[in-house]
Image (spheres, grey):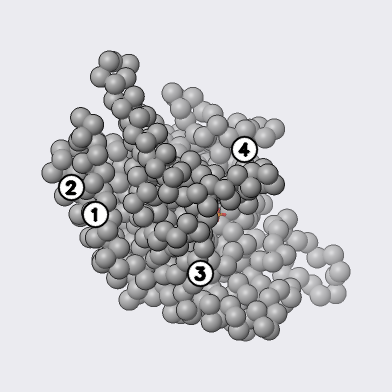
Amino acid sequence: PTQKATDRAAAIDRLIEAEQARFASRHPKSAAAWARGREHYLYGGPSHWMRRWAGGFPIYAEAASGAHIQDIDGHDYVDFCLGDTGGMCGHAPEPVTRAALHQLQRGTTMMLPTLDSLWVGEELTRRFGLPYWTLTTSATDANRGAIRIARMITGRDKVLVFSGCYHGGVEEAHVEIRNGKIGMRNMIHPNAVDHAAVSRVVEFNDVAALEQALKAGDVACVLTEPLMTNFGMIPVEPGFHDALRRLTRETGTLLVIDETHTISCGPGGYTALNGLEPDMLVAGKAIAGGIPAGIFGLSQAVAERMWQIVPHANPKQRQSAHLGIGGTLAGNALTVATMKAVLEEVLTEANYARMIALATRLADEARALISRSRRPWHVTQIGARAEIMFTPKVPRSGADVIATRQGDLETLLHAFYMNEGILVTPFHTMFLMCPASTEEDVARHTEVFARFIELLEREG
Ligand code: PMP
């Protein structure tokens, strides 16, 4: 590294230390709670994801409402993290709370369908276009179910994903390309799985590589977000979806589109907005307003192939085949009741229009500050979600992100945000709007981001 790069890294390191010290002094109660949490949780919090906040430890939440969270030290935050999308309906949205309370009093989980499920199934088809649905307890589980079905009906082993992807705790998708080599993403342990046997990985937007990878006809499905959101946002290039659909069809490979994050595009996700034709579609997180839930839908043709392998149950046979997909709590009465509330009253066309307008304002104002300060950064937006990336160019692939990302600057920004009353998901600089987000919330971000740039300018 050059002297200039070394000096820059040292300066950012000093600033991170200062922000983390400021964070510790502003959050004595959360610090004490975290120290106790470490006594009985493997990684301090009930989920290991909660340890990744840039202040050095998480704030402990006292309560949350709409787009705001209060912590146990008495601070208020504008929440653009929204539970990394699980809270995209806003915190404690009234229709979901009402539906949940009603259903809690009538029983939550019975291994029986409720009448609400009929409306939900019809609505999922209306929104996303696919005729047949299965509910799960998470998007991870929905992806696992879709992969399993793809293997069952194609008889093939491999799942193709794009480098830099994330699809939950899905073994096949834990791979990436780094320095031209295929390896495990994010230092994930290989877990005794032979990833060469079950996974194939290529760069996003690379039609030639995709064609090459599908040619042998041994890939059960391509699993992809319609554009990538989990390695910084990587937009899709014109023509890529057409090529992806054509190549998957030509090679008998199923196409699974994961809309878990891109549901921010609109009521039917990116798929409905852009007329994609996936064989299967997955979503989750926000779909039941914060109650654990995932969904996957199948096309008519895929469903018919599935019924040939596993027919509808014959009530005379005690041991009718099952799918090998888990989910005792999946599709239970509570999940279905809250999904109905979300689809009917929260993630509506009108609310999307407001959320998208706010994300557009945040993105525009951040872009103006970036260009005024001549920083080599950029901002991407998809619907109700915007992202600031510390890279000069919009990346085309995971390789571009690896080559240009400035992780230390991201950590500094995140720690600064927390001290200034703004929350964004620790592992992305993404800003998600919920129906309760306001113009004031966006204005607060613009003001704080301007002060962040000033902080860097003071440092030279
Ligand atoms: N798919 C995508 C695109 C995701 O971003 C995530 C989580 N970030 C998942 C699936 C998994 O969701 P969950 O952790 O809720 O199972």
Quadrant of the image occupied by residue 348:
bottom left
Work out whether residue 356 can be spotted. no
Mark 4 or mark 1: name the one nearer the start of the chain: 4
Disc 1 within 8 angstroms of ligand 1 (CB)? no
Q: Which residue is mark 4?
A: 198
Which element is circle 3 on? loop
Dot 2 amino acid type: Leu
Crowding around mark 2 (Cα neighbors within 10 Å: few <14, some 14 to 19, many 20+) is some
Determine which of the numbered discs, if any, sits on residue 446 in the image.
Answer: 1
Mark 3 or mark 1: name the one nearer the start of the chain: 3
Determine which of the numbered discs, if any, sits on residue 289 in the image.
Answer: 3
Alpha carbon distance from label 3 to label 1: 28 Å
Residue drawn at (20%, 30%) of the image: 460
Mark 3 or mark 4: name the one nearer the start of the chain: 4
Alpha carbon distance from label 1 to label 2: 8 Å
Mark 2 or mark 4: name the one nearer the start of the chain: 4
Q: Quadrant of the N terminus?
A: top left
Residue drawn at (37%, 71%) of the image: 436
